[in-house]
Amino acid sequence: MQGNPQLYWRKNLKYLAILLFIWFSVSYGCGILFVNQLNTIKLGGFPLGFWFAQQGAIYVFVVLIFVYVVLMNRLDKSFDVDEK
């Protein structure tokens, strides 16, 4: 691997920590902590808090997977360890 392997893994772990924090915040915060406030808003006929608890956290998780793929592809290219 060209470059600094410690820096590569540090950036990788930073990406993971940020994305997992976002997922935790959405799933726990919107699905549990702020459910009463979010339930005043309707989405497709259902309270928004219920929607986040049942569907929203899953959608956010899937989007975060794609974001992680894009971030890691960029990181791999910057450290010249991408698949060519």
Image: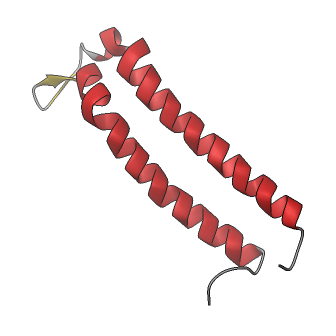
User: Residue at the top extreme?
Assistant: 36
- Residue 42 position by quadrant: top left
Residue at the (89%, 68%) spot, across then down: 4
In this picture the colour scheme is secondary structure
Q: Where's residue 30, x and y in %?
A: 39, 23
Residue at the (66%, 50%) spot, across then down: 15
Give left or right: position of 81 versus 55: right
Q: Where's residue 60, x and y in %?
A: 39, 43
Give left or right: position of 21 versus 80: left
- Residue 57 position by quadrant: top left
Residue at the (72%, 50%) spot, across then down: 13
Q: Where's residue 45, x and y in %?
A: 10, 26
Identify whether 10 is placed above or below 20.
below
Front residue of 42/60: it is 60
Quarter of the image with the N terminus is: bottom right
Quarter of the image with the C terminus is: bottom right
User: Residue at the bottom extreme?
Assistant: 84
User: Residue at the left extreme?
Assistant: 45
Give left or right: position of 3 versus 77: right
- Residue 46 position by quadrant: top left
Identify whether 84 is placed above or below 12.
below
Identify whether 16 is placed above or below 69.
above
Residue at the (36%, 22%) spot, across then down: 31
Q: Where's residue 23, x and y in %?
A: 49, 37
Q: How many marks?
A: 0
Front residue of 57/44: it is 57
Give left or right: position of 52 versus 16: left
